Image (cartoon, rainbow, N blue to C red):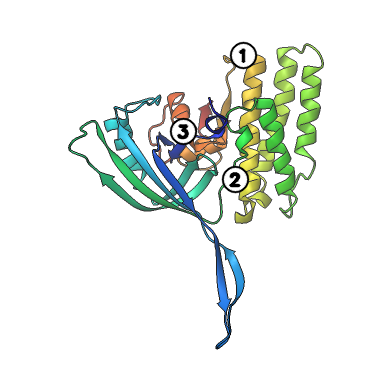
Amino acid sequence: MSALSDSLSDWAWEGVVFPASETSVEWGHDSARHQGYRQRGADVETTGQKPRAVTVTIPLRNGIRWTGPERLYPETYLHLREALKTPEGYLTHPTYGLMTAHVDSVRERIDPMRPDGLDLEVTFTEQRAESQELELTLARSASPADAALSSAQQVDAEGAAVDGRADTTSLAAAITEAFDYLDSAQRSSTEVASSLGELVADVESRLSDPAGMVSTAFEYRSALSRTRAALLDRRAQYLGSDAALTVTIAEDMSLARAAVVAYGDASKASQLAGRNRIDDPTLIPAGTVLVL
């Protein structure tokens, strides 16, 4: 498998994973041009970065290679079509990661010579500069321990710009200390659960801190969510896959957003739904306990 495929995340909109045959991202910088009468050239003043405009062609055809949980047509098509009725939601992009995006347009292409499905052409616009900026080397190939430490380092870096945080200690240092303790000798399941449980509780307390709820702290919250997901994966490695892991939803949210809280990845919404009884994927009530 190539380094490119190792580092890419799956495409997903509001938790519905889909394939892509063609995609492009367009962005740049807005500017004001100051030009004088009969004067050659211009003074270009940069006024800000443009939002990312994402265009993707989605082949929902049963003839292509696909390892998803259901057929591309009609099951994935129907689920994605329904999800696209939500004008703003979570888009998981292969290289830019998770972003809040607006659905600008959806175009269906039906080829009567190919009755195995259809194609969708969808355009999205990034909202409020909220893409995660994935570290490509840590998308799929990283171990949970490496991913947890890398994300925690980003928490420390992004958190420095968040005023009024209740906990300003280094999360990366706490994780390094805990992992060194666990790896230095054979530890009991009680010791493992206690050490990693304290780390997860630390991350959750930072996620619930009101100081991190401001719109400019999106990268900080995203890094915390990824750290939490990696710590839970690491705990499962230590204790075995049979260890029950749960998360309590603190406020009303969609299934896709719950997947972000639980795993740091909206594309894992189907995995979360498969382990829980979800009556309405658009609204999971506050206080719901989800099994991971």
Q: Position of residue 292 (x, y in %)?
A: 54, 25
Query: Could you classify mark 1 by the number of other residues whose Cα lies within 10 Å: few (under 14), some (14-19), or many (20 or more)?
Result: few
Q: Nearer the viewer, mark 2 or mark 3?
A: 2
Q: What is the number of the mark on residue 240?
A: 1
Q: Could you tell me which residue is drawn at 51 percent across and 39 percent down?
A: 94
Q: Nearer the viewer, residue 60 or 247?
A: 60
Q: Which residue is mark 3?
A: 269
Residue type (three-letter) at the residue carrying disc 3: Ala
Q: What is the number of the mark on residue 290?
A: none
Residue type (three-letter) at the residue carrying disc 1: Gly
Q: Which residue is mark 2?
A: 133
Q: CA distance from mark 2 to mark 1?
A: 31 Å
Residue type (three-letter) at the residue carrying disc 2: Glu
Q: Position of residue 267 (x, y in %)?
A: 48, 35
Residue 50 appears left or right of 236: left
Q: Could you tell me which residue is drawn at 54 percent across and 38 percent down?
A: 260
Q: Could you tell me which residue is drawn at 54 percent across and 41 percent down?
A: 95
Residue 51 appears left or right of 59: right
Report if residue 255 is visible in the image: no
What is the secondary structure assignment of the residue under circle 3?
helix
Q: Compared with residue 220, is residue 188 higher up or lower down, i.e. above or below? A: above
What is the secondary structure assignment of the residue under circle 2?
loop
Total numbered labels placed on residues in the image:
3
Q: Position of residue 208 (x, y in %)?
A: 64, 43
Q: CA distance from mark 1 to mark 3?
A: 22 Å
Residue 184 appears left or right of 64: right
Q: Could you tell me which residue is drawn at 68 percent across and 39 percent down?
A: 205
Between discs 1 and 3, the one toward the N terminus: 1
